Image (cartoon, grey):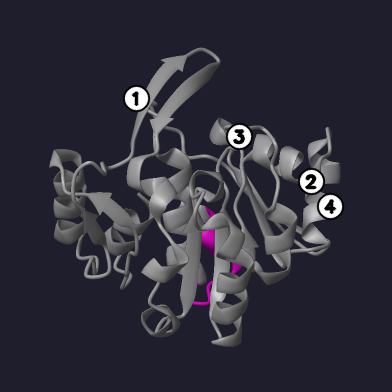
Amino acid sequence: IVAHNLAALGCKVGFISRIGDDPMGRVALDQLGIAGLDISRVKRIASPAYTGITVTLQRAPWRNMLTSPGTIAEVSFEDLDFEYLADSRHFHFSSYFLQKKLQPHVPEIFARLKSAGLTISVDTNDDPDGTWQGVDELLPYVDVLMPNAHEARTIARKDDLEAAVACLAAQVPVVVVKQGDAGAFAQKGKERFTSPAVAVAVVDAVGAGDSFNAGFLSQYVKGADLPSCLRMGNL
């Protein structure tokens, strides 16, 4: 979703992953291709491998997300083309906890990309196991951390959101916290920037956080100020 929507906003985007050679994989690749992404580094894996899929069960005031990880968990360090990755300005990493095979190598990946001059953003998403292990090792390399309020508290191991943000902002240059209909804010050191949510009739919140990430990053890579990045994320 992040990659697709970044491309829809006019950014030049490459995407690396594994995908099953099945109907779901073909649908996903078709849509990414239509959006204008470079999908040449996506590896199609023959049966019995299958494309990961998530089913969302919406209920007030929360939702359950059931994921069968498929090839998501099989993306490996060897799948990455570092010459290709380094030929860019920015690297965004999503779903840290679902990428089981890649997890042990993520600090090395980030270190190599930082040495190549890239900026890095991370949206860990939720941890189905509830352990939240390994994120601390990533933070020294991250330029923009993009959690929601729950994830921010959990990553920082703080019950209070403000305490969590202060903890994370001491380690990461920019911490962006998504708060649903309360909008979003960015913390840069001691500076706080806020942006209200756009008033709309909500139909389906699936992908809202990833869409925010795409809007924010589409401006961040152009050197825009944080209020402009937040505003585009909310739009």
Name the amino acid, label 4. Ala
Task: Specify which label sits upstream in the sequence, 3 or 1.
Answer: 3
**Which contiguous range is marked in magenta?**
221-230
Cα separation between marks 2 and 4:
9 Å
Q: Nearer the viewer, residue 176 or 132?
A: 132
Classify mark 1: helix, strand or loop: loop
Task: Specify which label sits upstream in the sequence, 4 or 3.
Answer: 4
Left or right of 90 on screen, residue 188: right
Name the amino acid, label 3. Ala
Classify mark 2: helix, strand or loop: helix
Tell which tag, 4 or 1, sits nearer the viewer. Answer: 4
In the rendered image of this protein, does residue 41 appear above or below residue 58? below
* Residue that appears at 32% across and 69% down: 13
Task: Specify which label sits upstream in the sequence, 4 or 1.
Answer: 4
Classify mark 3: helix, strand or loop: helix
Tell which tag, 2 or 4, sits nearer the viewer. Answer: 2
Which residue corresponds to mark 1? 203
How many residues crowd mark 2 within 10 Å: few (<14), some (14–19), many (20+)?
some
Tell which tag, 3 or 2, sits nearer the viewer. Answer: 2
Which residue corresponds to mark 4? 166
Which residue corresponds to mark 2? 156
Percent of width and height locating residue 231: 51, 54
* Residue that appears at 60% across and 86% down: 115
Name the amino acid, label 2. Ala
Tell which tag, 4 or 3, sits nearer the viewer. Answer: 4
How many residues crowd mark 1 within 10 Å: few (<14), some (14–19), many (20+)?
few
Percent of width and height locating residue 162: 82, 42
Task: Specify which label sits upstream in the sequence, 3 or 2.
Answer: 2
Task: Specify which label sits upstream in the sequence, 2 or 4.
Answer: 2
Left or right of 233 on screen, residue 153: right
